[in-house]
Image: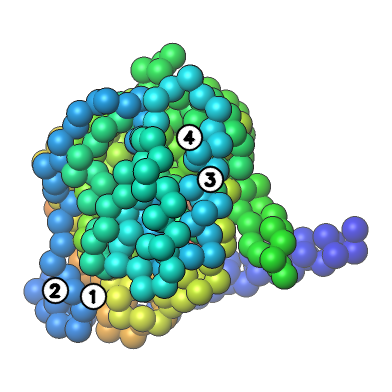
Amino acid sequence: MINRDIRDFAKMCLGYFYKVKYFWMQRFGHEIDLSVAEATKIVSNLDIEQNSSIKANNKINKVFDLMIVIPAYNCENSIEKCIDSVIDQKTTYKIETVIVNDGSTDNTAKILEKYQNKDNIRIITQSNQGFSGARNTALQNITGKYIFFLDSDDYIPSNTAMQDLLDLGIENDADIVEGAAFSFYYDNGKIKKNRDMVHAYEGKVHTSTDMMGYPWGKIYKAELFKDIKFPDSLWFEDTIISLLLYPETTKKFISNKLVYAYQVNFEGISHTFKGKEKTIDTYLVTDLIIKELSKRNLINIETERLFLNQMAMNYCRLKGLSSKINDAVIVLSINLYQKYFQRESENKLLTKKQTDLKNAIKKNDIKRINALLNCWNYLR
């Protein structure tokens, strides 16, 4: 009880601090004296790969009810548990598992040999192309009515998970079905649960923000990936799920049946990206997706809301970089909004802070934009 009281008190103090900071930044924060051309040059001059695409031309041949995609790179300690959790599934549905050995240099390839002659398991070997490249290779030939992404560090904790997801998906002709999950880590070889990831309700999704933005833990209709892929060579590739696929679908369902165990990787990108120039990928991915949304006539009040949230997330990810880069991304993000969302009418889906950010962008009020993005998680 004492620890809980201390946490609540600390949270309250932090909330007051950010309210004061928000007030101060609106009045005394710095302005940005950059044109869009100058901001573009700052970003393009960074020494990172910036050419990428989310467009694809994938073939779909629905031989199976579900295709499970497992990218495998140097995962000798976890790949067996991962694959065995698929093999152990008790289901009336036909499932193919596609494992992409993405240029592993440890014993991953040798371990995979024991699975190569098993029914409905397909192993692809390629030079290292990263998470996106491995998933995209599997997506080039989609063999299932639905697709499920499973990372090699993770596993499926319930042997009825795929049955549960497919039952709900097929019964409702769902575009996406997301189940419950938990995160874990290993402590002296033993699994320790980190936190549960469950939903406030079950059934048809009310709003996309009720779903997790991760690609795993859900099944997708094959057609969703017919002409879309994960952006090659860019970090934060998962952004296509929440910012593009969610707005494109109307039949989304969530369930609190357990379908996924996610291993927390303390050495992974999500824990180590701060301060690295490649973090700029978070903006580059956003830019790609907004342009694609426009081509698909999906610029509307829902995607406006998602973009404003994404703008705040990008700001948070970029905090470790120089103020010059941060300023450039803010200028470019404002330009994106003004180019694609400026004409949107009153949006009743927006929270107060989202409405404030929208109005600040329209007025080009840089001080207020900075203040809102900096204090975003402590505002309503």
Q: Please identify the quarter of the rendering in which residue 29 is found.
A: bottom left
Q: Quadrant of the N terminus?
A: bottom right
Q: How many marks?
A: 4
User: Which comes before the other along the chain, label 4 or label 3?
Assistant: 3
Front in this rendered view, residue 114 or 81: 114
User: Which comes before the other along the chain, label 4 or label 2?
Assistant: 2
Mark 2 Cα-neighbour bin, 10 Å: few <14, some 14–19, many ≥20: some
Query: What's the CA distance linking mark 1 and mark 4?
Result: 36 Å
Identify the residue under disc 4. Answer: 178
Report the mark closest to the observer, 3 or 2: 3
- Find out whether the residues at labels 2 and 1 contact each other: C-beta distance under 8 Å: yes
Identify the residue under disc 1. Answer: 328
User: Which comes before the other along the chain, label 2 or label 1?
Assistant: 2
Q: Residue at x 11, y 42 (%)?
A: 57
What amino acid type is highlighted by mark number 2?
Thr
Q: Which mark is residue 40?
A: 2
Q: Residue at x 62, y 48 (%)?
A: 182
Query: What's the CA distance linking mark 2 and mark 1?
Result: 7 Å
Query: What's the CA distance linking mark 3 and mark 1?
Result: 47 Å
Front in this rendered view, residue 362 or 234: 234
Query: What's the CA distance linking mark 4 and mark 2?
Result: 37 Å
> What SS does tag 4 mark?
strand
Identify the residue under disc 3. Answer: 84
Q: Which mark is residue 58?
A: none
User: Which comes before the other along the chain, label 1 or label 4?
Assistant: 4
Mark 3 Cα-neighbour bin, 10 Å: few <14, some 14–19, many ≥20: few
What amino acid type is highlighted by mark number 3?
Asp
What amino acid type is highlighted by mark number 1?
Ala
Q: Position of residue 184 (x, y in %)?
A: 63, 57
